[in-house]
Amino acid sequence: MSEDFLPIKGTDHIEFYVGNAKQAAHFYRTGFGFTLVAYSGLETGNRETATYVLEQGSIRLLLTTALGPDHHVARHAHLHGDGVGVIAMEVPDATKSYFESTHRGATGAIQPTEESDENGTYRYSAIRCYGDTLIKFVDRSDYNGPFAPGFEARNNGTGMNGNARDRYKGFGLMHVDHIVGNVELGAMNRWVDFFAQTMGFSQLLHFDDKDISTEYSALMSKVMQNGNGKIKFPINEPAEGKRKSQIQEYLDFYMGPGAQHLACSTSDIVATVTQLRDSGIEFLRVPQTYYDMLEERVGKINEPIDVLADLGILVDRDEEGYLLQIFSKPVEDRPTVFYEIIERHGSRGFGKGNFQALFESLEREQALRGNL
Ligand code: FE2
């Protein structure tokens, strides 16, 4: 096996560009159990944007809003609605990551940059990904402050290193399992090639459209992962159906390609989803008949089926084990970005066996929105 030319330690953060970061931060804190650990805004001398840094387990979300109409974050939020502007990965060398990927054909977005303060030096760069999404390379190995220069700690956030994160267990979300992108019809393979060529990712699985289509809507999906398997990027494109694909609905309302869902892992999905539900997070529901046939389909599992049915948690099994998963409804008014909560018991899949049941659920929601 050839050497990984783009080593990645893991997901550093996901940055959302939103219309009102203060209110979004409240939603993620009360609804999803995140903790505010750092902030940048007018009070810290930032005249351009306000950014809230939230953590739970090793998941770090940034919520950024522009303080005026001409900032690129304002234009992003105006065009796309609230959505993912940046997918940031922690790397050992942000400069090398930039040149390795751009020399292989990636389009540069932010040249290698370093910022220093009394806490050290924070280095980053970025390349363009699907739509207006950036992939950022972050090297924080010489930085020990609250998130990055220009940020102040909140709630005694002591920075991102060491065991500080262990304090922020929240609702039990642990790490980013995968980040799914939706691209235009016919563009999936181009993005598969992009991740393979410019970042050295390889393809993990392949669903063809026969596996995951209903009478009315369909998608094609391929999963790309990096060398150490920590980063997984499934890429969806709409497939032809009798009626509008859920992927096309996203593209129509996001006004182009972008991140569709963020999957967060938990080691106790029943406890996590119970807390999320009790905090007002809404999930897609499948009919009770799904659970009547469940044991026949997936065999014995540790969790009581009546509890899974009450919460709407789905189960799938493959040769390696099983997984439990559930999908939220979109977390903004446009039918765009949503969340998946996932607990893996050996399976490294993505819930292929649930796609049929889910599509039927999604189509009920789509029909209610008049978009089917
Ligand atoms: Fe997923």
Image (cartoon, helix red, strand yellow):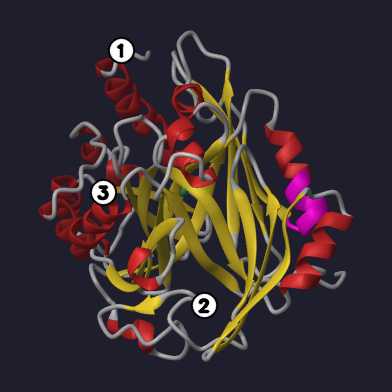
On the rendered image, what quadrant is the C terminus found in?
Answer: top left
Residue at image mark 2: 149
User: Residue 313 shows which numbered tag?
Assistant: 3
For badge 2, the amino acid type reads Pro
Tell me where residue 38 appears, x and y as whole percent. 36, 74
Residue drawn at point x = 33 percent, y = 21 percent: 366
Q: Which residues are magenta?
A: 194-201
- Mark 3 or mark 1, whichever is nearer to me: 1
Location of residue 332 by image quarter: top left
Density class for disc 2 (Cα within 10 Å; few <14, some 14-19, many ≥20) is some
Foreground of the two, 226 or 105: 105
Residue at image mark 1: 370
For badge 1, the amino acid type reads Gly
Residue farthest along the top direction in this orientation = 242
Residue farthest along the left direction in this orientation = 278
Main secondary structure type of the part rendered in magenta:
helix
In the image, residue 311 above or below residue 215: below
Disc 3 secondary structure class: loop
Disc 2 secondary structure class: loop
Foreground of the two, 183 or 273: 183
CB-based contact (under 8 Å), mark 3 and mark 2: no
